[in-house]
């Protein structure tokens, strides 16, 4: 196990290095001169040159990359052209909103998806097969941004049940920022109504983000359980007279859990990417909206910082999922 | 199995794989209304790509100043937009920048990835190492985010969005083809062809490639639907096709402002994306069932259910 962890860690380090290289190449492939673009056409040549040096754009490419890596190691993703602040600070400020959205959506997806998968095992075969076939296709084919608009139309426009977007009503007094997570902060005020309001704002965006996972979770739950239930060791466990409870808890779940956790984990990594579209529709003040705002304003350091940050998170989550898989599945022995 | 079925099965074996495959396709069409419907949707879409004028009698650029943001009616089937352009015509003409673009992107990714995968499997070892390392590096990224970064770097526009999609997508095909080519390479008929003195290129072209194609076709069909979502998503955040274009994602973006007052404007272009994407997915799954009968869901499901019920007694 230890050697496996070490080997995975080395693999992770290589992946992160590769990612930094790809993003570095991407940032260098930008058409035009970023320094000139930032300072305007009338800026004197000396200040453009100075700004180029400040951006780390002078010297040979190898040196530039080395400098880029050094900055990365210091958590320095450069300065945002628009906010004039470090990109890392901007991302850190927007991150809690995205984490909150992602966490709630993953919980929704797990409860809904795994629940549907379990439910399908109890349904008559024909219905279950039809559902198992249709649901993943439908949930993978819905354009998230369109689904979000439809929900806004129905739940805000027609029914008036949920807020249109944003994390908080502008009419209400701002909640004091303690942790940055609005759900936690509203809970700290001790007023359930405020927390309810925060949840109402979360409902639609979290669902839109969750529905992509719903079909996948339902399908893997169903097929993992079906596969394990048919295994010989389950029959043996039953034959030696174990109770259904014990068979499910001790023999079925540990084996079936591994693929389910893997699929959930893979989603966990990509949910931040999915947040880009969702946050744009619902004006959710997270890193996805920050990225789109940066794109609209051609704020390249911010865009590249965002891409690298989300990719690192993705790689890291996948690394953890891989470890989990080895730890969970009793059939994988190292 | 009844005696009759046994005879039918023996006859099917005698007919060979081509006939059986065709039979299976016909049976699939009959047993799955969803598949037939999907083929219908795709056929309509392809007609819209080829000759949009046939489907939409109105000009997608003609301004009808009497009907600005008009609701769906007999005159304008899907309503009109903020300058009075017919939305039905725009959705039909949007098939080109939407469907054709996603098809082209997947085709390019499949050809590029397929070629590199073949080289990686059959060429010199160092080339394989370089190609597979590059693809590993790209595969480590979240797909949409990487595509976003690349388009941002190259500059907005549908063309650059397609280039970005191809860059993030080819590694999947390279992997797929390499895996099948590695196993095909070991087959006796490949050795036979080599023994008969066929050149490396001829062996790859005549024997290896044709035997690696069916999983690629299946994957490509499913991917076109997904690609449509990615490209329209890029358009939606302002990176892909730009607004006056009738590309469906861009239309949803321009219609967004009118969502609450004129629901039809963003709704119908989005519906087009949804329907076409579902159709590609359903078609892809059906193709997989035809070409790779081991994975037929119904059969496996039936066996598994039986096993599961056996376990539950």
Image (spheres, rainbow, N blue to C red):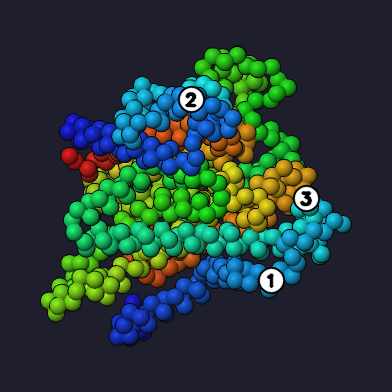
Q: Secondary structure at mark 2?
A: helix
Residue on which the image places disc 3: B82
Residue name at image x 65 percent, y 69 percent: B52
Q: Which numbered mark, 2 or 1, is in the foreground of this view? A: 2
Chain of the residue where label 3 is placed in the rendered structure = B
Other-residue count near label 1 (Cα within 10 Å), few / some / many at <14 / 14–19 / ≥20: some
Residue on which the image places disc 1: B53
Q: Are marks 3 and 1 on the same chain?
A: yes
Q: Secondary structure at mark 1?
A: helix
- Image quarter of the N terminus of chain B: bottom left
Report x, y in % for residue A253: 33, 41
Vertical position of residue B240 compared to residue A3: above or below: below
Chain of the residue where label 1 is placed in the rendered structure = B
> Answer yes or no: do the residues labelled 3 and 1 have beta carbons within 8 Å?
no
Q: Is residue A321 visible?
A: no
Residue name at image x 33 percent, y 66 percent: B294
Chain of the residue where label 2 is placed in the rendered structure = A
Q: Earlier in the sequence, mark 3 or mark 1?
A: 1
Which numbered marker is on residue A46? 2
Q: Are marks 2 and 1 on the same chain?
A: no
Report x, y in % for residue A171: 73, 22
Residue closest to the far front: A45
Residue closest to the far right: B66
Residue situated in front as seen by the camera: A140 or B110: B110
Tell me where residue A71 sits by quadrant.
top left
> Answer yes or no: do the residues labelled 2 and 1 have beta carbons within 8 Å?
no
């Amino acid at each position: 196990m230890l050697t496996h962890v070490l080997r995975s860690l080395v693999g992770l380090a290589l992946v992160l290095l590769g990612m930094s290289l790809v993003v570095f190449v991407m940032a260098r492939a930008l058409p035009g001169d970023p320094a000139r673009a930032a300072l305007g056409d009338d800026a004197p040549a000396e200040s453009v040159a100075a700004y180029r040096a400040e951006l780390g754009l002078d010297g040979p490419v190898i040196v530039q990359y080395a400098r880029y890596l050094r900055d990365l190691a210091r958590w320095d993703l450069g300065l945002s052209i628009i906010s004039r602040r470090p990109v890392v600070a901007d991302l850190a400020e927007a991150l809690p909103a995205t984490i909150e959205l992602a966490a709630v959506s993953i919980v929704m997806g797990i409860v809904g998806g795994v629940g549907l998968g379990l439910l399908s095992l109890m349904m008559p075969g024909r219905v279950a097969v039809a559902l198992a076939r249709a649901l993943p296709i439908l949930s993978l084919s819905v354009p998230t941004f369109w689904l979000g608009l439809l929900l806004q139309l129905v739940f805000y426009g027609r029914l008036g049940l949920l807020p249109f977007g944003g994390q908080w009503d502008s009419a209400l007094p701002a909640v004091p920022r303690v942790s940055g997570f609005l759900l936690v902060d509203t809970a700290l005020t001790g007023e359930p109504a405020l927390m309810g309001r925060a949840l109402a704002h979360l409902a639609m965006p979290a669902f839109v983000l969750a529905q992509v996972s719903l079909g996948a979770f339902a399908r893997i739950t169903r097929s993992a359980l079906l596969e394990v239930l048919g295994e010989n060791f389950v029959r043996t466990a039953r034959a030696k007279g174990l109770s259904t409870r014990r068979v499910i808890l001790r023999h079925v779940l540990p084996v079936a859990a591994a693929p389910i956790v893997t699929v959930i984990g893979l989603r966990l990594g990509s949910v931040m990417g999915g947040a880009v579209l969702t946050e744009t529709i619902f004006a959710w003040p997270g890193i996805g909206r920050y990225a789109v705002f940066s794109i609209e304003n051609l704020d390249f350091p911010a865009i590249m910082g965002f891409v690298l940050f989300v990719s690192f998170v993705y790689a890291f989550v996948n690394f953890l999922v891989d470890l989990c898989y080895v730890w969970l599945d009793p059939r994988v022995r190292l | 199995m009844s005696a009759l079925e046994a005879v039918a099965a023996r006859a099917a074996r005698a007919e060979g794989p081509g006939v059986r495959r065709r039979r299976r396709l016909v049976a699939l069409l009959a047993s799955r209304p969803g598949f037939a419907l999907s083929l219908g949707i795709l056929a309509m879409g392809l007609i819209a790509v080829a000759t949009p004028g046939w489907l939409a009698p109105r000009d997608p650029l003609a301004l009808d100043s009497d009907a600005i943001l008009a609701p769906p009616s007999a005159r304008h089937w899907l309503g009109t937009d903020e300058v009075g352009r017919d939305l039905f015509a725009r959705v039909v003409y949007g098939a080109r920048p939407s469907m054709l673009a996603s098809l082209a992107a997947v085709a390019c990714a499949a050809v590029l990835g397929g070629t590199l995968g073949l080289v990686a499997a059959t060429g010199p070892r160092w080339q394989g190492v370089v190609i597979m390392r590059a693809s590993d590096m790209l595969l480590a990224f979240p797909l949409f985010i990487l595509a976003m970064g690349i388009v941002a770097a190259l500059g907005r526009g549908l063309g650059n969005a397609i280039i970005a999609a191809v860059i993030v997508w080819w590694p999947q095909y390279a992997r797929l083809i390499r895996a099948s080519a590695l196993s095909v390479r070991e087959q006796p008929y490949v050795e036979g062809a080599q023994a008969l003195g066929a050149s490396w290129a001829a062996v790859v072209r005549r024997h290896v490639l044709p035997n690696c194609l069916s999983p690629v076709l299946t994957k490509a069909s499913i991917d076109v639907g997904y690609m449509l979502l990615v490209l329209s998503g890029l358009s939606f955040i302002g990176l892909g096709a730009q607004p006056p274009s009738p590309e469906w994602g861009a239309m949803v973006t321009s219609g967004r402002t009118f969502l609450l007052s004129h629901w039809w404007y963003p709704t119908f272009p989005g519906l087009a994306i949804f329907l076409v994407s579902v159709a590609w997915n359903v078609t892809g799954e059906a193709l997989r069932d035809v070409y790779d009968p081991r994975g037929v869901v119904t059969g496996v499901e039936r066996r598994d259910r039986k096993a599961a019920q056996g376990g539950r007694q």
